[in-house]
Image (cartoon, rainbow, N blue to C red):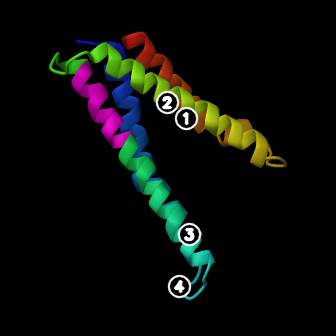
Amino acid sequence: MNLLALLAGGLTLAAFGVHAGVGAREFRLFSPPVDGEPPRTAWVQALSGWHWVSMDLLAAGIVFVVIGLADILPDESTVLLMLSGYFGLASVVWLGTVAVAGRGVPKRFVALGQWIFCALVAALAFGAH
């Protein structure tokens, strides 16, 4: 049993639940009118990207839990390092985007703190490898 991988999996699956459930409902609040082209097209594209992130969170969470509970994947250490790199890079990209595009947003680094989640999961995955 790998407790750090299980913790990373639990956090990632919880993030998936919030992202796919609560977040998707909030995202729909910004839906432009159906005949509002091109904003409607851009919104549909953004919503598709939103659910792509949800799928990533679900898949990563499942992999973390499988690694945490069983020794069935070949070279689990490499998988954990790859997940650590993925979430670490996501943290850097998110933080960079908030820093550049979030000018004027009050407390932008805390209010848009998904980078903290990604950094935490990256650290857990690295520690679990």
Q: Secondary structure at mark 1?
A: helix
Amino acid type shown at disc 3: Trp
- On the question of residue 107 being in view, the answer is no
Q: Provide the residue designation for mark 2.
A: 87
Q: Which residue occupies the foreground of this view, 18 or 41?
A: 41
Q: Provide the residue designation for mark 4.
A: 34
Q: Is residue 64 left or right of residue 28?
A: left
**Sequence order check, earlier mark of 4 and 3:** 4
Q: Secondary structure at mark 4?
A: loop
**Sequence order check, earlier mark of 2 and 4:** 4
Q: Is residue 118 left or right of residue 75?
A: right
Q: Provide the residue designation for mark 3.
A: 43
Q: Which mark is residue 90?
A: 1
* 49 relative to 10, above or below: below
Q: Is residue 110 left or right of residue 28?
A: right
* 126 relative to 112, above or below: above
The residue sitting at 39% across, 38% down in the picture is 14
Amino acid type shown at disc 4: Val
